């Protein structure tokens, strides 16, 4: 078990305990985001009881009951606009390999951390 497993568990915990939430995941490279983090997330979702309530595609995880407002997404850390417009009372940002993410991305993320249940989890 490593840091990527921990990130997957945090995503699953947040989506299971915060109905009507947004989770935004990023990493400096597409490989780290899609091939590593998202693959790990799918693995752990398949192993837990949440697999009946949530579905995970190549770029999203969402509630089967409410997919439009209860979901997580994978977003490339290539441009800050990928992080603008995410606002919800329950929001979580997962930043993998945080030291490799540009300052303008961090500024966009900080602009969305305005509610009481806004979090950023970085490794």
Image (cartoon, rainbow, N blue to C red):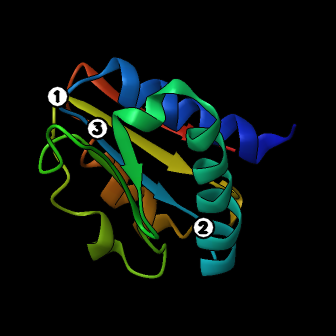
Q: Are marks 3 and 1 in contact (CB under 8 Å)?
A: no
Dot 3 falls on a residue whose secondary structure is loop
Chain-order first, disc 3 or disc 2: 2
Mark 2 Cα shell of 10 Å, populated few (<14), some (14-19), many (≥20)? many
Q: Which residue is drawn at the image coordinates 38% and 49% (left, top)? A: 55
Q: CA distance from mark 2 to mark 1?
A: 25 Å
Q: Is residue 66 above or below residue 95?
A: above
Q: With 45 as the anchor, is 58 left or right in this view?
A: left
Residue 99's x, y, as percent? 70, 59
Q: Residues within 10 Å of mark 1 (few under 14, many from 20)?
A: some
Q: Nearer the viewer, residue 51 or 16?
A: 51
Q: Which mark is residue 33?
A: 2
Specify the label residue 14 is tagged with: none
Other-residue count near label 3 (Cα within 10 Å), few / some / many at <14 / 14–19 / ≥20: many
The residue pinned by badge 1 equals 89
Q: Is residue 56 left or right of residue 89?
A: right
As drawn, 111 above or below 38: above
In terms of secondary structure, where does tag 2 sit? helix
Q: Nearer the viewer, residue 77 or 1?
A: 1
Q: Residue at x 34, y 33 (%)?
A: 53
Q: Is residue 74 visible?
A: no
Q: Across the whole image, how many numbered discs are drawn on residues?
A: 3
What is the quadrant of the N terminus in the image?
top right
Residue at (18, 48) in percent of width and height = 67
In front here: 45 or 121? 45
Residue 39 falls left or right of residue 63:
right
The numbered mark, 2 or 1, whose residue comes first in the sequence reads: 2
- Expressed as whole percent of the image width and height from the top left, the position of residue 82 reads 31, 72
Query: For the point 78% across and 42% down, which residue is it?
Result: 3
Q: Horizontal and vertical percent for residue 52? A: 39, 34
On-image quarter of the C terminus? top right
Which mark, residue 113?
Answer: 3
């Amino acid at each position: 078990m490593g840091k990527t497993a921990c990130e997957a568990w945090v995503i699953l915990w947040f989506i299971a305990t915060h109905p009507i939430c947004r989770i935004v995941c990023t990493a400096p490279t597409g490989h780290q985001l899609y091939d590593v983090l998202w693959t790990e997330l799918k693995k752990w979702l398949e192993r837990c009881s949440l697999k009946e309530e949530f579905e995970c595609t190549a770029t999203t995880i969402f509630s089967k009951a409410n997919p439009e407002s209860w979901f997580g997404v994978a977003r490339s850390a290539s441009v800050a606009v990928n992080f603008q417009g995410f606002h919800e009372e329950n929001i979580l940002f997962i930043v993998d390999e945080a030291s490799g993410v540009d300052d303008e991305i961090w500024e966009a993320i900080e602009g969305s951390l305005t509610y009481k249940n806004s979090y950023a989890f970085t490794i």
